[in-house]
Image (cartoon, rainbow, N blue to C red):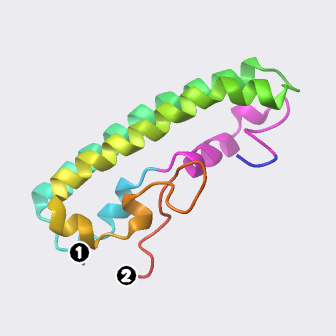
Amino acid sequence: FGGGGFGGGATGAGTPDFSSRLAQILPNPIPVILGFKDSLHFTPQQDSALQVISDSLDTLNHAVGDSLQAAVKAAGDRPDPGILFARLRPKLQLGRDNIRKALDKAKVVLGPELWAKLPAAITTPGAGRRGGGGGRGPGGD
């Protein structure tokens, strides 16, 4: 997560900055996939199913975020970074697993033909990046 970790300081874990950092670390790739609905001609059923998957992932990873935030807050103002990261790692992995499962569901909804038309940066979290995550946008399409 970079040098600053999750918010450093007494107010770090309670600030909106924490939410934005979490969104960078555990991004929801489904809204990006939904951005292709017109160009790839998703059916209304596919669009609806993907929205349900996205909402479910947001709910799951919101809980992960709450857990991460609580762990950061409990660590105090000047936590040992190694110890803190060791405590956060399983929670981060859970968030990445949630993303992978959501992508697996989205792949089933779209089918192999449409799935193959999506950029690998979206369909393969962490491709070319250490630590996971997904694409940030449609990539010019």
User: Which residue is label 1 attached to?
Assistant: 38
Residue sitting farthest toward the right? 78
Q: Residue at coordinates 73% horizontally, 23% vertically from top-left? A: 73
- Looking at the image, residue 90 sits to the left or right of residue 137; the answer is right
Residue range highlighted in magenta = 4-27
Q: Amino acid at mark 2?
A: Asp
Answer above or below: position of 106 versus 114: above
Question: SS for tag 1?
Answer: loop
Circles 1 and 2 in contact, beta carbons < 8 Å: no
Residue 18 magenta-drawn? yes
Q: Amino acid at mark 1?
A: Asp
Instruction: Examine the image and state in which quarter residue 90 appears.
Output: top right
Q: Residue at coordinates 75% horizontally, 49% vertically from top-left? A: 2
Coordinates of residue 140 in the picture (x, y in percent): 43, 82
Q: Nearer the viewer, residue 9 or 113?
A: 113
- Looking at the image, residue 20 sits to the left or right of residue 102; the answer is right
Numbered label tally: 2
User: Which residue is label 2 attached to?
Assistant: 141
